[in-house]
Structure formats: structure tokens, C-alpha cells
């Protein structure tokens, strides 16, 4: 029975925390809000940390990495090795 309650509490904590994900709140503020709503300290800390990590992953996935660009590398190689045929 404890596992069901724990899983339900986790689900509820993540649902609450996801509401704060794009508000600009920092991890400690999300943690404090969850703790204030009655979630256990360890769970609130874990959920707040994971929500911030997910937010950063979402941001990183939307920003293109210029080093992954074929055209950038092609131009760079042609500049360094002008006789190189590509």
C-alpha cells in the first residue's frame, strides 16, 4: 500500500512542479512551494531538481549547436586547406 501512496505522491508532486517549470522560478523556490504544499522534504528536493534539469534539457535541445553544422566545418576546412576538394 505504501508504494501506491508513494507513487501517487510522486505523480502529484511532479504535476505541481511542472506548473512552475516555465515560470522562471529557481530550484529552491520550487522546492519550497512543494514542501509548503505538504510534500516530504526529500521528494520536494528531488522533484524540484529534476524539473529544473528537464527545463535546461528543453532549452538546450532548442538551441542549435553551431559545431554540428556541416556547412561550418566545410567552410573552415576550405579556409584552412584551400586546395581540398569537398
Image (cartoon, rainbow, N blue to C red):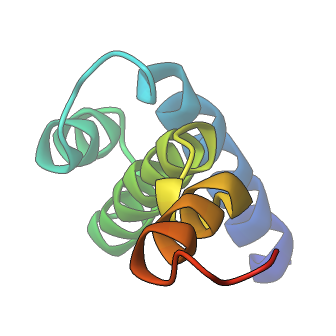
Q: How many marks?
A: 0
Estimate the x, y position of residue 82 in percent, counting from the top left: 53, 75
Residue at 56 percent of width and 70 percent of height: 78
Estimate the x, y position of residue 73 in percent, counting from the top left: 58, 69
Estimate the x, y position of residue 75 in percent, counting from the top left: 55, 59
Name the residue nearer the viewer: 54 or 11: 54
Estimate the x, y position of residue 69 in percent, counting from the top left: 65, 57
Q: Is residue 5 left or right of residue 48?
A: right
Please tell me whether residue 73 is drawn above or below residue 14 in the rendered image: below
Name the residue nearer the viewer: 11 or 37: 11
Q: Is residue 7 left or right of residue 17?
A: right
Given the current orientation, which residue lies at the most extreme top position? 23
Residue at 43 percent of width and 60 percent of height: 53
Q: Is residue 71 left or right of residue 36?
A: right
Residue at 82 percent of width and 74 percent of height: 86
Q: Quadrant of residue 36?
A: top left
Please tell me whether residue 38 is drawn above or below residue 22 in the rendered image: below
Rendered-image quadrant of the N terminus: bottom right
Residue at 54 percent of width and 77 percent of height: 77
Name the residue nearer the viewer: 14 or 62: 62
Q: Is residue 51 left or right of residue 23?
A: right
Amino acid at each position: 500500500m505504501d508504494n501506491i501512496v508513494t507513487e501517487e505522491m510522486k505523480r502529484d508532486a511532479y504535476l505541481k512542479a511542472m506548473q512552475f517549470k516555465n515560470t522562471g522560478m529557481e530550484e529552491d523556490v520550487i522546492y519550497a512551494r512543494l514542501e509548503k504544499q505538504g510534500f516530504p522534504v526529500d521528494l520536494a528536493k528531488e522533484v524540484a531538481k529534476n524539473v529544473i534539469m528537464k527545463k535546461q534539457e528543453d532549452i538546450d535541445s532548442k538551441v542549435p549547436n553551431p559545431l554540428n553544422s556541416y556547412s561550418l566545418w566545410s567552410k573552415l576546412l576550405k579556409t584552412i586547406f584551400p586546395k581540398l576538394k569537398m
